[in-house]
Image (cartoon, helix red, strand yellow):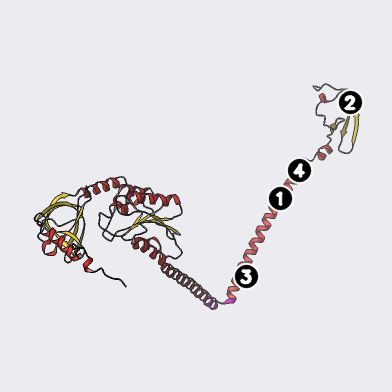
Amino acid sequence: MTSSLPNSLLPETTVSVAGLTDYIQELLEQDDQLRQVWVTGEVSSTNRHRSGMFFTLQDPDSKASIQCVVWTSQLGKLVQPPVSGEQLIVLGSIRVYPQRGQYQLSIWQALPAGEGLQALRYRQLRNRLEAEGLFDEERKRSLPNHPQIIAIVTSPQAAAWGDIQRTLRYRYPGLRVLLSPAQVQGEQAAASIVAAIERVERDGRAQLLILSRGGGASEDLACFNDERVVRAIAECSIPVLTGIGHQRDESLADLVADACAHTPTAAAELAVPELATLYAEHQQRQYALKDAVTQVLEASHNQLQHLENRLRRLPLDRQLRGEQKAIAQKRQQLVQSTSRRLSQATQHCEFLRQKLATLDPENVLKRGYAVVRTENGTIARSTANVVPGQELQIQLGEGQVKVKVTEILDSNL
């Protein structure tokens, strides 16, 4: 049980929330300078609603911004409708929204003031990076079909982190998810995102990197158009998938990434296949394989049946006689070929025998020739190899004799 403070103890200057809001509303809305004020700034984000168009007018140098609204009845009277990136000069008055305790600029008229500085910087950076080839489709890598480890670069406090975890857990149970925390909004966000990407690369386990953040105003997503972030994604050795903002948002990080989705949940769905889908596809392949095997078996059975029917229609005796005749012809051809080859071989052998006989040394000796050898068994081929008194061995056609050299005759005689 709580007890309230007695009214007698409350300070005399105490006012309720409604009273304070009413005071602020009267103070702002009754100020002569704020009842009709010209303001120049750059449109950073727009949101069309049935009651009117809500947008943010931003000072690109100081980052100051103010919420604006053009009611539907006034939209058609504007010279220049609010468009993101355009510089406008608007005429309006300050109005307080008591339910939220916020003030906004209610617009009566809007005039063009040229391209916004922020939009110009964005366009120049995009053109320069595009000229370098960072957005070319040829350099984009395919995402892994079945990654086992995925790294997420986002804020651990962001709703995107929870959405991604739930989607991955539902679609692909058993997947390992690594968080590389980073700021995804504010002045330090770009440097924080670059450090988170480098952390994933040093770790080396992830097969896919998802860079993600939920939706927001364009000024909230400015870090994803930072050149440092774009180059970190381009130089990352791991395939990068982005899931930034809402359907209508597109950043330079999306353009340089290997693949992009419009929301964190969509990025998670693109990163991994759904287990139920894989199971259904596997079943489809099983059914297709079974059908293919069944078709082959049926075709083979039909062919076998057709051949069986043809065989039954043929006179078996006539077929056997034809086969016997063919075999007899083959046998006769084989015998003839063998006989011819055997005759040729016999003739060749006889020729070789006769040639060998003519070269037989014994046959030469039988014709009256002799072989003279010295004491060591070498053949004496010249008188230069013998001397008087030397014993020689002569081999005749039949038998051998030993002789002694008594005289060496002149070889010219």
First in sequence: mark 1 vs mark 4: 1
* Rendered location of residue 295, percent (x, y): 47, 72
Q: Which residue is mark 2?
A: 390
Q: Nearer the viewer, mark 1 or mark 2?
A: 2
User: Can residue 287 be seen by looking at this rendering?
Assistant: yes
Element type at marker 3?
A: helix
Q: Which residue is mark 1?
A: 347
Element type at marker 4?
A: helix
User: Do the residues under discs 3 and 2 have CB atoms within 8 angstroms?
Assistant: no
Marks 1/2: CA–CA distance = 49 Å
Dot 2 amino acid type: Gln
* Rendered location of residue 276, percent (x, y): 42, 69
Q: Which residue is mark 3?
A: 324
Which of the 4 image quarters holds residue 311? bottom right
Drawn side of residue 245 relative to residue 59, left or right: right
* Rendered location of residue 106, percent (x, y): 14, 59
First in sequence: mark 3 vs mark 1: 3
Q: Which residue is farthest front?
A: 8
Which segment did they paint magenta? Answer: 305-316
Marks 4/3: CA–CA distance = 47 Å
> Which secondary structure type mostly characterizes the magenta part of the structure?
helix
Marks 3/1: CA–CA distance = 35 Å
User: Do the residues under discs 3 and 1 have CB atoms within 8 angstroms?
Assistant: no
Dot 3 amino acid type: Gln
First in sequence: mark 3 vs mark 2: 3
Drawn side of residue 254 relative to residue 57, left or right: right
Q: Which residue is mark 4?
A: 356
